[in-house]
Image (cartoon, helix red, strand yellow):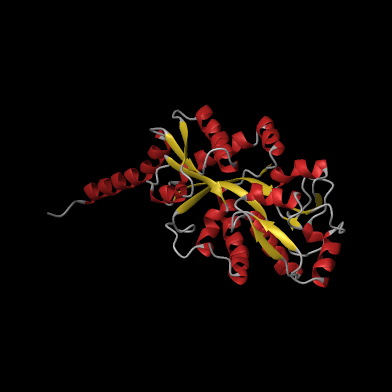
Amino acid sequence: MLLNLNTLTRLILLCALVLLSAPASSASTYPTRPIRIVTSEPGGGNDILARIMAEGINSNLPQRAIVDNRGIVAAEIAAKAAPDGHTLLVYGSNIWLMPFLRSKVAWDPLKDFTPVTLAVQLPNILVVHPNMTVKSVKELITLAKSKPGELNYAAGTIGVSPHLAAELFKSLAGVNLTMVPYKGGGPALNGLIGGETNLMFPNAGAVMPHIRSGRVRGLAVSTAKPSALVPDLPTIASTVPGYETTAVIHMFAPSGTPVAIIDVLNRETTRTLTRPEVKDRLFNLGAEVVASTPAQLGAYMRADMAKMGKVIKDAGIHE
């Protein structure tokens, strides 16, 4: 039987109304159950940020956010979760660099995640042992070029920011430095303090107390512009053009999460991150609040993958 024009028109309008109302309905009722924020082990920077961002969600949304410490499998859990905003990932930039470091990774950073916000950045600081005669980046480069391979740098976990900051420096400054591996950032920093190595690129929060005490000498910061965390230090880029790297911590949702839900999450988490007392708390831990838009995080991720992916490949770094 053929439908008359009026009946067909009504059906078309009904379908259009259903399609238009579905996203609005899901956003207006979100969240319908507790939100799970998966992250790394307890006590680290990822864990601290996850709990701060959970506080913001708990203050303003009708369901609670619960932090679930799952280690490196956190990314795999989030990648496989339903794209409904009830499972989120808070982690560092090694999540999107992991495919360059390992032959098999259970997620694709570009296909499996939707950006929510770039939460904070943690600058690296180029530091040397006090027995080193150099007082500037320029002097360090001159010394390193006069003794190829003789100067060494301490590195903890392979493929994280202190290690990659050193490799980027080697590449752009044209120097040959020898890596001395340690079982983690803490032992690596202790090795530098103890005089076992010459230099290191630790995160600001870990090394600032030791700069103040004189146990190590700070030469420069890794950010493109001077950092308020270490206002007396110049940038490495002022001597090595184009040098810029920093550790970051961010929030992602599973790919396909509705834009309206992403907007809610971005609004509530960035509102919390930018509160003066939260910014001060994070600043004292060596982190600078960014609180980006989803688009800004996406652009940052792609740019960092292009730059640091090349560094990893050229240096032959593989876990």
Tag count: 0
Q: Residue 118: percent from the left, percent from the top?
A: 59, 47
**Residue 181: quarter of image:** bottom right
Which quadrant would residue 156 be assigned to in this image? bottom right
Q: As displayed, is residue 285 above or below residue 111?
A: above
Counting from the top left corner in percent of width and height, residue 84 is at 40, 43
Q: Is residue 67 left or right of residue 174?
A: left
The answer, for residue 226, to whether it is visible in the render is yes
- Quadrant placement of the N terminus: bottom left
Measuring 74% from the left and 64% from the top, which residue is drawn there?
Answer: 242
Q: State the image coordinates of residue 22 (x, y, percent, origin top left).
A: 36, 42
Work out whether 35 lies above or below 112: above
Q: Of residues 202 and 60, which is closer to you in this image?
A: 202
Q: Is residue 120 above or below residue 53?
A: below
Judge by depth and name the residue closer to the eye, 136 or 273. 136
Looking at the image, can residue 229 be seen?
no
Q: Position of residue 125 (x, y in %)?
A: 74, 52
Residue lying farthest to the left in this orientation: 1
Side of 283 relative to 50 (left or right): right
198 w.r.t. 48: above or below? below
